[in-house]
Structures are given as structure tokens and as C-alpha cells.
Amino acid sequence: MQTLESLLAKLIGEAQLTQATLSNVRQKDADAFNKVTVKPVLIKDELKYQFTYHFAKKTTNENRSGAQTQQKLVELMQTVFRQALLHSKEADHQVLISKKGSATILKQKATKATVELSHNRKKKYLLEEGKPVPFLIELGVMNKEGKVLAKKYDKFKQINRFLEMIDDVVPFLKKDRILNIVDFGCGKSYLTFALYHYLKEEQGFELNVIGLDLKRDVITHCNALAVALNYEHLTFLHGDINQYDELDQVDLVVTLHACDTATDAALEKAVRWGADVILSVPCCQHELNAQLENKTLETMLQHGIIKERFAALATDSVRAQLLDLVGYKTQLLEFIDLEHTPKNLLIRAVKQERQADVRKIAESYLAFKSFLQIEPYLEVVLKDKLEPIFQLQTRGD
């Protein structure tokens, strides 16, 4: 008759074990773990077994070698648990321990014959690793075989995070006509090329994409790359956000790292165009820093670095609420930004047909503005759209 020890020696010795679950504790203890799960993991090319101890309100993990795993499983079954389910590539083995300590082993059909060995499972990206993407090859992120270059892997993750956010707003973009998209402050345009590729090649949209930046050499380089990639409807222009007026209507506005009130200028343009979607990652928010004045917050505002961070958060909060007031549903999301700070905020605004409770939003905004004694740039440039809403709030109609 096969013993528990001999079974574990075979499963672990031949690397057959795909998962183990130990349950049915012999003696209940509210402070002790009540279940243990075990799975094989590959750590630095070495096969280990990860033990997860399940407590009432937490879990803890430890990794063991094969020999240590075999010894620990026997120990747990002899002292703590009465039942185990051992999954292997060939069969499932249900182990039952009697009150006298003898083990009964029932062999069943395998239900988990395969296992993901990676310690941290590989994330599934919208742009897949191993699948060559022309613009990523041209930008030096991938080689011709589709392998992501080690020094560009962070950029690869950033591009995919951005595309996840684009994918989220695809339902709000119209497919019955050519979409006008403007990227203000496009820079080297990794994300502009990604946006064009994903919406046109992956999602089938007809596009007219404009990238705008103040650096002439960057614009020249990006236009040459667009030609090389045969991206016929992607054009890069040299120009300033405030002065750009070549389009009467734009569906999607992207602005990444536009400094200080340049972000607000782009948001104003988007609102006046009636853009269905706005995606903005602000940069260097200095405007409100000079305006903030509040004795109650003096404990914070007396410290320059704290005041700077608070002003940045207040600026983006104001932007989100003002966009809500002019007909958008706005969210502030975390965005991977490797060129400036480890983490940044992304403002994602989607135009909504049904107006939100503007009176309540206006009341909250005006109270916040008064409390901090600020006059935000975006409110000033959108005065004609916001004043009727504020008057409605003041009158209490």
C-alpha cells in the first residue's frame, strides 16, 4: 500500500506536483492558519514550492526546496490537518488522515495537469511580447523578432498601460466617420504612434491624427518615421497649443506633460471642440502654488515641498471638477510615467449626454475655491461656459 511519504517522494522527486491543498484542521485555533496551499514556482531558474498559509484575515508565504517541501507536508499532515488534495500531472490524490494517524489515499482523474511556474505570472499586454510591431521596432523598443529589449522594457510597459486606458474609452469613440485626434506636446511620440497603431490597426478606426510640439527636430524625426511606417494619416506639426486652430472639431484630445497652464490651454481647446474623450497627464503645476493662502492649512503650506505637492493635487482636482461642470464624467487615474516621476496622475474625461448634478458640483467647487483663495486658469478661460452654471447655483433656482 502506498504511504503518504512515498507518494510525496514520487510527486516531488519527479516534479509531478502541480498543486496541493491541506485543510480540515485537527484543532481549531482562531489565531492559527486554517488552510495551506502549495504550488511550484520557478525562481532564478530553480524549482521551488511556495507555501501559502491562510489565516482568518491574512495570508503569508514562504518558498521551500523540494526536500524541504516533502518534509513540511508530512509534518503538517501528521500534526495539523486531516485532509489533503494533491494535484499532479497524471492524477489527483485525495489524502484522508484518521484519528489514529493512518492515511487513506484515493486516486482520481487529473484535474490540474499543468501549472504556471513563473513566480510572477507574465502580464498579458495589449501589444504582446514576441509579436513584432513595426512602430516598436522602428523606435528601438523591440527587435525584428518581437523581443522587447531589456533597456526598453519599462517603456514597453508604459506604452501598454497607456493603451489600456485608450482601450477603456474605445466605446465612447464614433466609428461611423473619420476620427480627428490631436496630441498636444507629443514629444518623441512613443505614445502617439502607439495610439495610431492600436486604434487603426487593432480596432479598425479611420483616423486623422495630429501631433503638435514646439521642438522642430522632434517633429522632423517623427514625420520621417510616420512615412517609413506608412502611417498615412499621422502628421506632426511644429506649433503652440494656444495658437493651433486648424480643426473645427476633434474627437479625442491627448496632452501628456504639457507644463503648467499649457495643460489648461489644451483642456480648454478640447472642451470648445466638444471632444468625446480627453486624456491628460499634467506636468509641473505651478499656478496655484503662488495663489494658495489659508491659515487653517498653514501647518502644511509653510513647508515648500508639501505646498508644492498639495498645489499639484489641488490643481488636478480643480481641473476634474471644472470638466464635470461643462459636461464630462472625469476620473483621476494613476499612470506609469518614467520620464518625469515614478507615478503621475492621468485625467480621463468622457463627454456625457446626461448632465450630472451641476448644482451640487458647483457648490462644492466654489466652496473649495473660496477655502484656498484661488483663481484657477482653466476657470478663467472657460468663463463663458461656467458663469451661467455658477449663477444658477447662486440664485438657487
Image: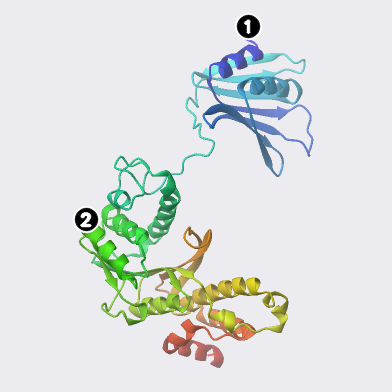
Q: Residue 95: give its label.
A: none
Q: Nearer the viewer, residue 12 or 155?
A: 155
When the figure is inspected, residue 320 is found, relative to residue 228, above or below; the finding is: below
Which residue corresponds to the image point at 56% horizontal and 73% vertical from the top-left? 312
- Local crowd size for mark 2, using a 10 Å CA cut-off: few (<14), some (14–19), many (≥20): few
Q: Is residue 302 above or below residue 331?
A: below
Residue at 47%, 90% (x, y): give it: 387
Q: Position of residue 50 (x, y in %)?
A: 61, 31
Check if mark 2's residue and mark 1's residue have beta carbons within 8 Å: no
**Residue 1: numbered disc:** 1
Q: How is the image coloured?
A: rainbow
Residue 350 at x, y percent in the picture: 41, 69
Snapshot quadrant of residue 394: bottom right
The kind of residue on which mark 2 rests is Ala
**Point 61% across, 86% down: residue:** 373
The image quarter containing residue 232 is bottom left
Q: Position of residue 352 (x, y in %)?
A: 41, 72
Q: Which residue is mark 2?
A: 228
Q: Quadrant location of the N terminus? A: top right
Residue 395: percent from left, percent from top: 54, 93
Looking at the image, residue 246 sits to the left or right of residue 283; the answer is left
Q: Is residue 396 visible?
A: no
Q: CA distance from mark 2 to mark 1?
A: 70 Å
Q: Amino acid at mark 1?
A: Met
Indicate which disc, 2 or 1, sits on the residue closer to the N terminus: 1
Q: State the count of labels.
A: 2
- Give the secondary structure at mark 1: loop
Q: Secondary structure at mark 2?
A: helix
Which one is nearer the viewer's eye here, 137 or 330?
A: 137
User: Which of 289/391 is in front?
Assistant: 289
Could one spot residue 339 in this view of the protein?
yes
